Amino acid sequence: MSPRRSYDQYCSAARALDLVGDRWTLLIVRELLAGPRRYTDLHADLPGVSTDVLASRLKDMERDGLSTRRRLPPPGAAYVYELTRRGRELLPVLQALGSWGERALGERRPTDAVRAHWFALPLSRSFGGGSAGLVEVRLEEGEFHLWVGSEEGPLYGEGPAPEEPDARLSFFDAEAYGAVGRGELSLREAVRQGRVGVVGEGALAKELRDV
């Protein structure tokens, strides 16, 4: 393993960038916020990263205490990567970075890859500091579920919710979640305009319908 590069500056921002400033590292953190992931799954959801770079970043993250690797018991018997507590502490950093980058997002370009679960972070910001709970989300690109207000465990997961969610959201057009992701439209306003359907009897569903 090659030695970690450093800015060699006695500054907390520089030290943080020593750890997560390399290309792809924070996007790997984004993927691991979904919980344990296999290498093949990470590679599939990080289009554009080479196998060598992904392997190198994962080794760096393990060395720096941001993630761990463990072997699943049979019959899985595959290795998975997951964030440590220190790694999960990067969630507000990613949220702040995503909020700052909303104005740079613009319209989707023909060359842009997209995954449904990439909308989990901006959507979680849309709920603010209200009720906590499990939300199932349906987009044109697929489904994912989101634990709103979760401080432990995964932030989101692919596919339908593993149990009865507090709310089910259906975005009726791509522009609706694009506008929410860019910060141009609040989730509550999208519901009010009839561009997002809300089903459920949990507190989160009731709050969204109370517009």
Image (tube, rainbow, N blue to C red):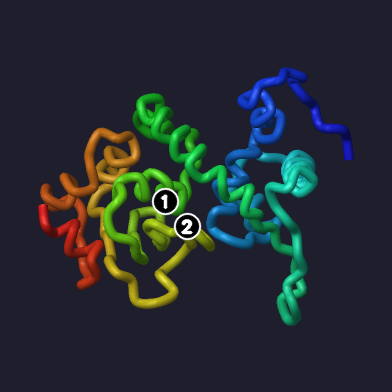
Name the secondary structure under disc 1. helix
Percent coordinates x, y for residue 57 in the rendering: 74, 41
In the depicted view, which residue is nearer to us: 44 or 154?
154
Residue type marked 1: Ala
At 30% from the left and 47% from the top, the residue drawn is: 128
Position of 163 with respect to 3 (left or right) is left
Please say if the residues under marks 2 and 1 sit with CB atoms less than 8 Å apart: no
Mark toward the start of the polypeptide (2 vs 1): 1
Q: Which residue is mark 2?
A: 151
The residue under the point 11% across, 48% down is 193
Question: From the viewer's perspective, is the residue at label 2 or at label 1 nearer?
Answer: 2
Quadrant position of residue 140: bottom left
| Element on which disc 2 rests | loop
- Image-based side of 67 in relation to 134, left or right: right
Q: Which mark is residue 13?
A: none
- The type of residue carrying mark 2 is Glu
Q: How far apart are the two marked residues, 2 and 1, measured between alpha carbons?
A: 15 Å
Measured as percent of width and height from the top left, residue 132 is found at 33, 61
Whether residue 1 sits left or right of residue 203 in the image: it is right
Note whether 73 is above or below 103 in the view shown: below
- Residue at horizontal 75 percent and vertical 59 percent from the top: 69
Q: Nearer the viewer, residue 115 or 88?
A: 88
In the figure, is residue 132 to the left or right of 208? right
Circle 1 Cα neighbour tier, 10 Å, few/some/many (<14 / 14–19 / ≥20): many
9 and 187: which is toward the camera: 9
Q: Which mark is residue 120?
A: 1
Within 10 Å of disc 2 (Cα), the crowding (few <14, some 14-19, many 20+) is few
Which quadrant of the structure image shows residue 5? top right
